[in-house]
Amino acid sequence: MWERLTAPDKTVFKTPLFLISFWLPVVISMILFGLIAFSDGLTLSIMGGSDAYSLMVERMKVPLIVLSLSIPLSGLVASNHRSMQLVKTIRGQERKRMYDLYYDHQKEFCTTTGRIIETDEWSYIENADLPLIHRSVYRHNIDELNDEFSPNTTVINALLSFVEEGNNFIESQKVEIFEAIKNDHFKEASDKTLITFENLIMNLNRFREFLMVRPLKSEEKYLTVLKAVCEIDLLRGWFREKYSDKFDKVFNEHSLNELLVEISNYFGFSPYDLDKGRLIAVLQLSEIKKKDSS
């Protein structure tokens, strides 16, 4: 309602509040002039001299006072309108400054992290993903007008949970898979392997609610899944609020590689070829052979 009356986007002379403040005293004073003149039977004589004007001033004090309010009220509205426009201009300039800082920060982040992606030959996170990742982690600073650009704590906490939960799950599954392989329980080993990687894919795709990385499909090669988890964990090192902070990698990449090698050796696939489809096919062939032999 106030925005409609003040209309800071318009010139002051076109705002409803200015028109009301200027014309309302004029209208009220004219009504009072008419009522007083009618009730006292007065007529305005231009040629009546000083006596006529003295009588008018004496009888019309209240209407004249009301009429005199028109200028100061409209002046007050005009002053307030200029202040509102100034505040809006300052806010716009501050918002533009924040966007400039944001895109400068994004450019530095994409350039630096992009170089790491190329040097370390990442396969899951690509250069094209970096602007979306940066937006997920740092976009909140614009709304908060925070020019220090600290990472979003919600995203960081979700990332820590994702990595730590993945670690714990891998360790528990690793024991069971190794035990099944050791005892040559083929179906049990394959089932637990499928569950392990399906769980990693499901958790990663759920994590996309916080960090905009590309989704993984269930038919992805297992090595891709492992690299995705490891690269996300490594990426966390570039979300430090202060570059002097110590960064300890949480995700146990060695344990994952050990698991992948053990599974690959047992099922006879290269780590680069092992995927859900091949594992299911081997499992089905094994079941067919069992039926044929029986």
Image (tube, rainbow, N blue to C red):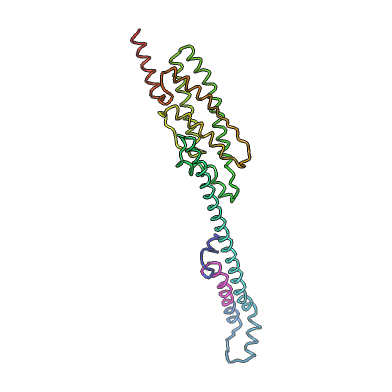
Q: Is residue 2 magenta?
A: no
> Is any atom of residue 146 visible in this view?
no
Which region shows up in magenta?
A: 14-31
Q: Residue 142, percent across and down? A: 55, 50
Q: Residue 271, percent across and down? A: 44, 24
Q: Is 120 displayed left or right of 150 in the figure?
A: left
- Which image quadrant for residue 214? top left
Q: Nearer the viewer, residue 174 or 44?
A: 174
The quadrant the N terminus occupies is: bottom right
Residue at 40% across, 28% down: 219
The residue lying furthest to the top in this view is 294
Q: How many marks?
A: 0
Q: Main secondary structure of the magenta part?
A: helix
Q: Is residue 29 magenta?
A: yes
Q: Is residue 59 above or below residue 175?
A: below
Q: Is residue 216 above or below residue 55?
A: above
The quadrant the C terminus occupies is: top left
Q: Residue 246, percent across and down? A: 63, 36
Q: Is 214 displayed left or right of 160 in the figure?
A: left
The residue lying furthest to the left in this view is 292
Q: Residue 24, percent across and down? A: 57, 72
- Which image quadrant for residue 234? top right
Q: Nearer the viewer, residue 4 or 278?
A: 278
> Is any atom of residue 149 visible in this view?
yes
Q: Is residue 12 above or below residue 253?
A: below
